[in-house]
Structure formats: structure tokens, C-alpha cells
């Protein structure tokens, strides 16, 4: 919100959404986040309006990039964990099918089925640790990028302040 003030916007009102608005929005995919309604106003005859609009657009795009980078670690970690978990499920299914086949069950079936089932369960357990490791690795990779993007936002806001002072 304070970023917009650098581009000449003034906050008029800021209020939480009503229960009815909140219900509608939360049932259309916002993951249960609390939402706020903010209204801004800006002088129509502000100096350097075109340049300020370009800088504002740049800031908004940079915020979207930061949001995408922050979500990337969770998304890739989840994809990795799901892949390992599905492999575990397949191995457990194979283990069960070996034992529940329509033929006579012998000792060899148990000798083959048991290690396959154990590996399937180990895959389930390892999927959690794979999620944590993958998420941490991507967060470490993205941390400098996010810092640079925050610096870009700061520079754009600084430039906007200078344009408004002209």
C-alpha cells in the first residue's frame, strides 16, 4: 500500500470485506485469505503522470514476479513429493497384486512382495523429506533474485518520488 503513495496515490478508505463478500470470494479460489478493500485517489493533473504510470506498472509486474518466485518453492516441492509418493503407491500395488494373484501363493511370492512393499512405504516416507529439501533448495536459489527485485521496486519508488518533486 505504501508503494502506491510514491506514485501520487492517496488512500481514501481501507476496510475488510463484509461476510457476504468474503464468503463469495473464499468460495471462488482465494485459499481462505482475508481480503481488504482499499480505495485510492490521485490528482488528475499530477506532474509526469505518464512516467509515473510506467514506473507503477513496472512495480506491479515486479510484485507479481516476487509472488511467483515465492510460490515456486512450494509448487516444485509438492510436485517432487507427489512423484515419489505415486511411485510408492505403484510399488505397494504391485506388492499386493503379487500376493493376491489367482494362482497358488508360494514362499517366493512373499520373498518378492515384501521388499517391494517395503520400498513403497519408504518412498512414502522419503517424499516428505524430498519436499523439504527441494523447497529449501529452491528458496535458497530464489532468495538473491527476490532481494534484487525488492531493490528494483525501491529504485522505481525513489525515481517516482524524484519525478513528483519536479
Image (cartoon, rainbow, N blue to C red):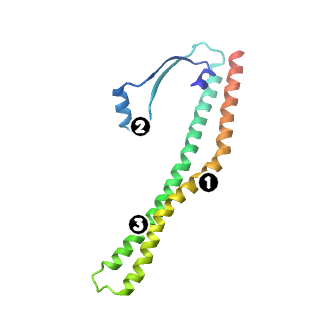
Residue at image mark 1: 137
Quarter occupied by residue 143 = top right
In the figure, 87 relative to 48: above or below? Answer: below
Q: Please state, as top left, top right, bottom left or bottom right, where the N terminus lies in the image.
A: top right
Taking the image as shown, residue 15 lies to the left or right of residue 132, namely: left
Residue 79, image x, y percentages: 49, 56
Q: Residues within 10 Å of mark 1 (few under 14, many from 20)?
A: few
Q: Is residue 29 left or right of residue 138?
A: left
- Up/down of 46 relative to 110, above or below: above
Which element carries disc 1, helix, strand or loop? helix
Residue at the extreme left: 102
Return the disc, 2 or 1, that comes first in the chain's sequence: 2
Residue 131, horizontal then vertical, whole percent: 53, 56
The circle drawn on residue 32 is 2
Which residue does the image show at 57% across and 43% down from the upper left? 70
Which quarter of the rendering shows the C terminus?
top right
Q: Residue 53's spot in the image, x, y percent?
A: 61, 24
What residue is disc 3 on? 89
- Secondary structure state at the residue bearing disc 2: loop
Q: Are circles 1 and 3 on residues that touch, CB within 8 Å? A: no
The earlier-in-sequence mark between 3 and 2 is 2
Q: Secondary structure at mark 3?
A: helix
Which label is found at residue 59? Answer: none
Q: Quadrant of residue 4?
A: top right
The span from disc 2 to disc 1 (Cα, nearest Å) is 27 Å
User: Mark 1 or mark 3, which has the lower sequence index?
Assistant: 3
Q: Residue 125, position in %: x, y? A: 48, 63
Between the residue at mark 1 and the residue at mark 3, the CA separation in whole angstroms equals 26 Å
Measured Cα–Cα span from mark 3 to mark 2: 31 Å
Amino acid at each position: 500500500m505504501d508503494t502506491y503513495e510514491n506514485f501520487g496515490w492517496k488512500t481514501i478508505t481501507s476496510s475488510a470485506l463484509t461476510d457476504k463478500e468474503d464468503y463469495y470470494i473464499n468460495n471462488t479460489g482465494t485459499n481462505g485469505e482475508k481480503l481488504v478493500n482499499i480505495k485510492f485517489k490521485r490528482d488528475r493533473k499530477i506532474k509526469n503522470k505518464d512516467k509515473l504510470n510506467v514506473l507503477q506498472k513496472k512495480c506491479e509486474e515486479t510484485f507479481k514476479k516476487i509472488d511467483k518466485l515465492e510460490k515456486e518453492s512450494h509448487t516444485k516441492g509438492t510436485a517432487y513429493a507427489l512423484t515419489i509418493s505415486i511411485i510408492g503407491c505403484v510399488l505397494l500395488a504391485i506388492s499386493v497384486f503379487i500376493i493376491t494373484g489367482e494362482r497358488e501363493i508360494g514362499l517366493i511370492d512373499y520373498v518378492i512382495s515384501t521388499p517391494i512393499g517395503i520400498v513403497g512405504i519408504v518412498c512414502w516416507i522419503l517424499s516428505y523429506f524430498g519436499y523439504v529439501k527441494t523447497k529449501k533448495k529452491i528458496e535458497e536459489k530464489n532468495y538473491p533474485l527476490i532481494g534484487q527485485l525488492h531493490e528494483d521496486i525501491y529504485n522505481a519508488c525513489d525515481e517516482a518520488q524524484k519525478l513528483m518533486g519536479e
